[in-house]
Image (tube, helix red, strand yellow):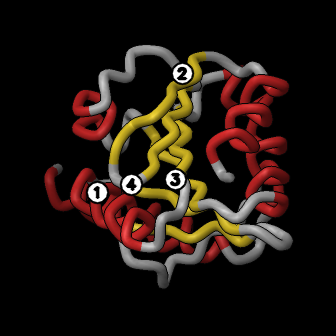
Amino acid sequence: MKLELTSLVALLAALSCVMAGSSPRPFGITKSCNTPSTTTILDIRGGAVHESSSLSDLESKIQSAALQNKLTIIDFTATWCGPCKAIAPLYKELSEEFDAQFIKVDVDENPDAAQKYGVSAMPTFLFIKGGEVVDRLMGANAARLKELIAEWSL
């Protein structure tokens, strides 16, 4: 029984890698099976939204942006969250418009990051500059999200 379950899991993993290259993803997101498991770069028209699935990876990205005096916006999201899905296309567009680092964190895959930053509702957007949280937006408020990015990316 255990061997059958292991074989089934391996088959599903292989099938998902095959399908990843041939099936469309929501919001124009593509994911490569060759990408390291801790970080997935999402291919987006002109900008880039990075996914982070570990706290250490997220902190590394924040530190890197701080050294460049660059704003980091983190979207704490979940696959089951309707408002998160609704605002995802705007977040993608904003990554093309503003010179900032855009990161998505799935709270189910990276609960340590959500806990560290006190995230209890999705979506929650954190604005980090110089390694410090300078602002927070809870909810899928498109106009306010754009305002805060414009304000803090100066």
Q: Nearer the viewer, mark 2 or mark 4?
A: 4
Identity of the residue drawn at 14% across and 53% down: 2
**Residue type at the position of mark 4:** Gly
Q: Residue at x 37, y 71 (%)?
A: 67
Of labels 4 and 1, the one closer to you: 4
Q: How far apart are marks 1 and 3 (CA)?
A: 11 Å
The answer to whether residue 139 is left or right of residue 143 is: left
**Which amino acid, by three-letter code, is at mark 1?**
Glu
Residue 38 visible in the snapshot? no
Residue at the spot of label 1: 59
Q: How far apart in space, not on screen, are marks 4 and 1 (Cα)?
A: 12 Å
The answer to which quarter of the image holds residue 82 is: top right
Q: Going by the image, does 36 lie left or right of 14?
A: left
Cβ atoms under marks 2 and 1 closer than 8 Å: no
- Precedes in sequence: disc 4 or disc 3: 3
| Mark 4 touches mark 3? (CB < 8 Å) | no
Asked if 144 appears above or below 15 in the picture, the reply is above
Residue 15 visible from this viewpoint: yes
In the image, which disc is placed on residue 72?
3
Indicate the position of residue 96 as horizontal and vertical percent values.
Answer: 81, 63
Dot 4, crowdedness within 10 Å: few (<14), some or many (≥20)? some
Of the image marks 2 and 3, the number of the one nearer the N terminus: 3
Circle 2 residues within 10 Å: few <14, some 14–19, many ≥20: many
First-in-chain label (2 vs 4): 2
Looking at the image, residue 18 lies above or below residue 47: below
On the image, numbered disc 4 is attached to which residue? 130
Q: Distance between the residues labelled 2 and 4?
A: 24 Å
Amino acid type indicated by mark 3: Thr
Circles 1 and 3 in contact, beta carbons < 8 Å? no
Q: Mark 2 points at which residue?
A: 122
Looking at the rendered image, the disc whose residue lies closer to the viewer, 2 or 1, is 1
Image height of 46 relative to 26, above or below: below
